[in-house]
Amino acid sequence: MVAPSRADTSISRRSNLVLLLLLIVFMLLAVLSSPGVTVTLDEPLHYHYGLFVLEGKTDRIDDSSMPVSALNAFPSYIASYLPYGLLKNVLERFFIARLITIVFAALFASVVFRWSEALYGFAPAVFSTILYVLDPNMIAHSQLVTTDVFAAGMIMLSMYLLWKFANSQKTSYGLACATAIGLSQLVKYTAVALFPLGFAALLVHDWPLLRSAFRKRGYRILTRYAGRLIVYILTSLAIAVAILNVGFFFNRTFTRVRDYRFRSELFRSLQAGMPALGGIPVPVPYPYLEGLDWMRDTEQTANRYGNVYLLGHLSKPRGFPGYYFIASALKVPIATQVIILVSLAAFLADPRRRGQFLHNEIFLLLPVAVLTIYFNFFFNAQTGIRYYLVFFPLLYVFSGSLFVGWRKLPGLTRATSVMLLVYLGVSVLSYFPYFTPYFNEFVWDRTQTYRYLSDSNLEWGQSRDDLKRYLSEHPDAIYNPARVQAGRLVVGGSDLVGILENPARYAWLRDNFEPVDTIAYCYFVYVISPEEISELCARTDYCR
C-alpha cells in the first residue's frame, strides 16, 4: 500500500478546509435567518407524525408525512423524559427540530462537493457547492420540519453511490446504494422513482461494454449480465422492503390487496380490475402503500391543497403545463441559471466530455430529465418550487463541469465566473432573512411578486411574527379586510390571489390598486383613500 504524498495530503487538507468553510456559511445563513420564521402550514403535521413514530405509532395522519420526521421530533421526544430545567427547555424548542433539517442539508452539501470534486476537480467542486449554499430555496426549506430537503439530499446520495458502484463494481458500494435507496423510501414518495431511474442509469452505463462483449461472445454474455442485473434489482428491493418495514414498525405488513381501503381512482380500479390478486399479501407496511394511494388521490382531486396559481391565473384540480419551468425562471437566482445553462451548452459542444456521459453524467442528468418532464407535465399539486428541489443538487454537481481546468481557463472567463458568484451572493442576501419569498431580478419590484407566483413560493405562514409586529406598530392597519373599504390594508399573498380563499374576495383590491409596501416580502400593504373608494364604487359593482 502506497502512503499518500505530502502534495496529496496538502490538497486533501485544502479541500477539507474549503468544504468546512462552505458548510459554515450555509449553516450561518440558515440559522441566523431562522428565528423570524414562524411555523408554516405543513410543519405541524410532519412534526407530530415524527412524534407518533417515536412512540411506535405509524398509522397515517395525512398523505405526505413520513418516518424521517422522527429525526426532527427526536430532541423533543428525549426532552419529555427529562426533568424540568435548561436542557429540557432547549430541546423542546421548535428551532431545535428545525436544526436537524439544517444539519442534514449541510451534510448533503458535502456530498455535492465530494461528487463534483471526484468528477471534475477542486475548483469545480467549490463552484458546485457555492450554487447549493447560496440557493435561497434550499436555505428556506432547510429551516423547516418538512421532507423536501431530505428528499433532495437522499436522491442525490443514492445516485452518487450508484455512480461509484457502476464504475467500481465494488459490492460495498452496491450495498450502500441499495441502503440509501431504501432509506429514501422513508423520506418522500418521489423517491420511488429511484428504482426505475437507477435500473435505467445502470443499464445505459453498461451498454457500451455489453455491446462490445456481445459481439465477441454472443448471447452468453447477455444471459450472464441479465442474471447479474436481476440479482442487483432483487437485492435492492429486498433491502428497501426490509428498511420500509423497520421504519414503519411492520405496521400491518402482509395485508392482502383486497383488505386495503383505497381512495384514489387508480388504486381502486387496480384493486377491482384484478380480483385474482386480492388474496396476495403485500410485503410492505399498510401505511406506506396507503400513503401512496392518498397522495395519488390528493393530486388528482386537489382535496388537500387550494387553487394552483401561475401568472395571474388559477387552476384546480389540474395544474399548468410547464409550471415549474416558469417557477424556476423566477425563483432560481439568475446567476445560477446562467451557470447551469452554459454548463449544459459547453458539455454538449465538447466531444471529449460527451464521451464520458455514459460513465458519469448519466447518473446526474437522467434523473433531472425524467423528473423535469414528470413535474412539469404530469404532476398537478403545483403548490411551490419545493417539490422541484429534488434534483437541484444533481444540477449543481453537473454545473461544476463548466469549470474543469480552472487555472487554464482564459482570464476573462474566470473573471466572469467570479462576478457571477458575486452577483449570486448579492441577489440572495438582499432578501436576508426572508428566503421563502425570494424572487430573482426578473421580478424587480417586490411589491408585484404575487402577480407571478404564490402559495409556498411566497406566503406559507412563515412571517406571522413580522405581520403582528407591523400591525402593532400601525394600529390603523386592517388585516384581511372583510369588505371594500379605504385605509391601510394588509393582505397576505396567498389570500390576495385566492389560493384558499374565494378568488373573487380581493378582486376589487388586486385589480384596481397597487401595493405601496410589503411586510417580509409576503404580506402586501395598500394605502387607499376614501375618494379612491368612492370612484371605484361609482364605476364598478364591487361595493354593492
Image (tube, grey):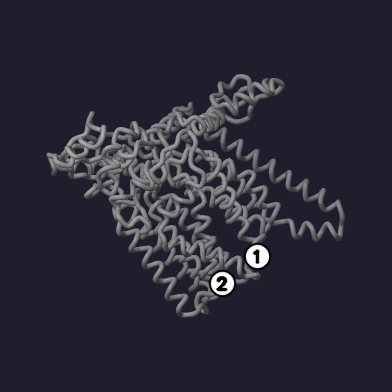
Q: Residue furthest front?
A: 539
Camera-side residue of 207 and 440: 440
Q: Quadrant of the C terminus?
A: top left
Image location (x, y in percent) of residue 97: 36, 42
Whole-percent x and y of residue 141? 39, 47
Q: What residue type is labelled 1?
A: Gln
Dot 2 lies on which element?
loop
Q: Using the numbered discs, state the Cα–Cα distance from disc 1 to disc 2 in whole angstroms.
A: 28 Å
**Residue 81 visible in the picture:** no
Q: Residue 381 carries which label?
A: none
Q: Which residue is drawn at 52% across and 48% down?
A: 154
Instruction: Specify the amino acid type for callout 2.
Output: Pro
Crowdedness near tag 2: few (<14), some (14–19) or many (≥20) residues, C-alpha within 10 Å: few
Q: How crowded is mark 1: few (under 14 residues within 10 Å), some or many (20 or more)?
A: few
In the image, taking residue 538 as reference, residue 322 lies left or right, namely right
Question: Which residue is under mark 2?
Answer: 4
Ranked by sequence position, the earlier of labels 1 and 2 is 2
Q: In which quarter of the image is the N terminus?
A: bottom right
Is label 1 in a helix, a strand or a loop?
loop
Residue 374 placement: quadrant: top right
Q: Label 1: which residue? A: 356
The image position of residue 533, as x and y in percent, is 18, 38
- Identify which residue is drawn at 61% across, 60% down: 361
Residue at screen point 18% across, 44% down = 527
- Residue 327 visible somewhere in the drawing: yes
- Of badges 1 and 2, nearer the viewer stands 1
Number of on-image labels: 2
387 to 307, vertically: above or below: below
Position of residue 510 in the picture relative to residue 123 (left or right): left
